[in-house]
Amino acid sequence: MLLLALTTSLSAFLLFSVQPLIAKQIVPWFGGTSAVWTLCLVFFQSLLTAGYAYSDWTTRRLGRRSQAALHFGLLALSLISLPIVAGDRWKPAGGEEPSWRILGLLATTIGLPYFLLSTTSPLVQTWFARRFPRRATYRLFALSNLASLAALVSYPFAVEPWVPTRIQALVWSAGYVGFMVLCAVALVANLRSSDTHRRDLESVAELPDPSDPEPRAAEQLLWFALPAMSSWLLLAVTNHITQNVAAIPFLWLLPLALYLVTFIIAFDHARWYQRELFVLPMLGLLVACAMRLPDSDLDPDIRIAIPLYGAGLFMCSLFCHGELARLKPPPRHLTRFYLMLSLGSALGAIAVGVVAPRIFSGYWELGIGLTLTALLAVVTLRRAFVLLPLAAVGVAGACAYFTYVERRDYRAGAHLLVRSFYGALRTLDMIPPDVPEATRQLIHGTIIHGQQALATELLTTPTAYYGPTSGVGRALATMTNPGRRIAMIGLGAGTIAAYGRAGDAIRFYEINPQVVDVARREFSFLSGSAATIEIALGDARLSLANEPPQAFDLLAVDAFSGDAIPVHLLTQEAMAIYLRHLKPDGVMAFHVTNHFLNLAPMVKQIADANGLGSALIADTGETDIVFKSDWVLVTRNRAWLQRDDIAPSTSPIDDIPGLHPWTDDFNNLFQILQ
């Protein structure tokens, strides 16, 4: 019993610890966007389904010895994947749609080991049922989810800040070898178990029992639909609170942890989930979450929104997993049960992570998910007390209505709505164009990525975070030499092009092709600039690493204000690349305006480590079209920072105790969380 429990726990721990590990390796290649994490979840959920299908097929179709031989062979074959280090050949060239490249990278790097780990829970539970027929087999599933939760929570606190990424990969690979040993011993023990017990026949499928009928089709549909909606809501809530509520990194951790906790509660023991106690609060939270959808992008109160959506996800997942646990079959059908569960989970993840960005222009999937969950409650509760299904019908109607209102309000006044792998973009006229103060904004979630005044005389006026008194504005004002070369990481609306003069060259680095299209179609900064405009499509760091020295007078980095902080643009290795492209007396400007992260001390740490001078310019903004902004200016020329037109506007940067310069191996956003 201890052997099987250890095997299950270690496999689950490795399953969930490898997810952030492999994502950390590849996120920098694709712009640091959280969409990479979402696509990773889709891949892992789909491969989990394949593992459960394998477990079901081998348990039903193969004898114990054939099953053991096949599994031994696959375990041995998986050794060729170790260590799990992503190959450089998968790095993007720039401009291509990254989804298939990411999936291919994951498949070749971690595919077979992850597949075998995913087979462990159903296989071990089958072996457990044979050996201990009177024990609570499904508690092993709760144990595996507890191990998964431990891996998830420990990674950002106990692993990421202290262990280099390559060492993480090597340690994980060693842990996988340990799992292989445990799994092999468990296979041998299963083969040697007593043949006198009826559960030790060659296959669980050989156990006819008149009191154990085949599951009905309707029952198997619920095995599929309940986890599908839970998985749908997991990804939809994660997207919603990170894109539309608060641009706080780490928020992906909260929904996934809540999701796993509900599995533990539901499958540990039947006494923990009581339908009569949980259904009505769950329906109430569905309505409350739906009611806030129309206001989600209007400066939401995160003190209300995050607890509300967290509680809503928890209760809905607990309902789905609790009802699923009520429907769990006898161990004879265990592998089929897990196969349907994983199929549903994979479909929910694919619907939100792959399909939704391609068919929706906004984040509509949460409202749709809330509505479908209420409809699923109608079906699940159809034989319960009549008021429960009637209440669920009313809730479904309310959720559908607020989903419609959200979509209507989101589109109101919008000139353009587009969405891709990198997120949803819209342009919005804050005041009608015929009003002198009219402005057009480029918005991603709740983050404004650019703004332009629409009055003819103001079309070329620098706005938003780029006003004349901003850090980047003051830096450019000191550069009076002809033929300036300016680099901008992050295009937005292209506002910095307003500073371009005849003979200047402004080179933008942008990873999202849709941003380039929107900047050209909806704003005139690029077309109206006197400078020569160049656009390099792809991840900025990869592009700069592959280019010859550009001799920039100014290199500005504006990529840290959104929900996905591209840490790889703020490390020692990144600074070395920037310096290679900068003139000896050139200036780097880092836009560090952020409600949730104190980025200025990290820029200063990296500057100090490279013998560079740094200064913070905090601009309060002077007009309605210029925003408050924080810029850190970095240069080799410390005397430049003492100029009369720079020094009076600077302020000191307070150090954070214990903070050290980030590298590609050592970085953690928790260190600078405000």
Image: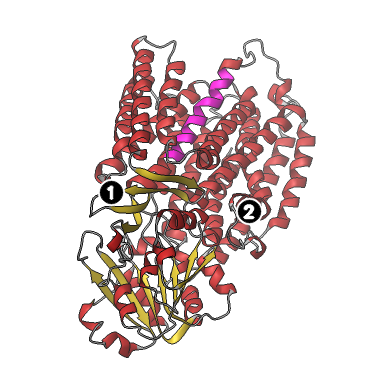
Main SS class of the magenta portion in the image? helix
Dot label at residue 525: none
Give the SS element for disc 2. helix
Could you tell me residue 471's position as x and y percent? 30, 73
Could you tell me residue 528's position as x and y percent? 40, 65
Horizontal arrangement in the rendering, residue 53 relative to residue 349 (left or right): right
Could you tell me residue 490's position as x and y percent? 44, 64
Q: Residue at x 33, y 73 (%)?
A: 472
Task: Identify the residue under disc 2.
Answer: 101
Task: Identify the residue under disc 1.
Answer: 430
Nearest to the observer: residue 150 or residue 191:
150
The quadrant of the picture occupied by the C terminus is bottom left
Mark 2 / mark 1, whichever is N-terminal: 2
User: Identity of the amino acid at label 1?
Assistant: Met
Q: Residues within 10 Å of mark 1 (few under 14, many from 20)?
A: some
Disc 2 versus disc 1: distance between alpha carbons?
A: 38 Å
What span is colored magenta in the figure? 219-236
Residue 310 placement: quadrant:
top left
Whether residue 190 is visible here, answered yes or no, is yes
**Front disc: 2 or 1:** 1
User: Identity of the amino acid at label 2?
Assistant: Arg
Residue 416 colored magenta? Answer: no
Nearest to the observer: residue 235 or residue 502:
502
Horizontal arrangement in the rendering, residue 184 relative to residue 252 (left or right): right
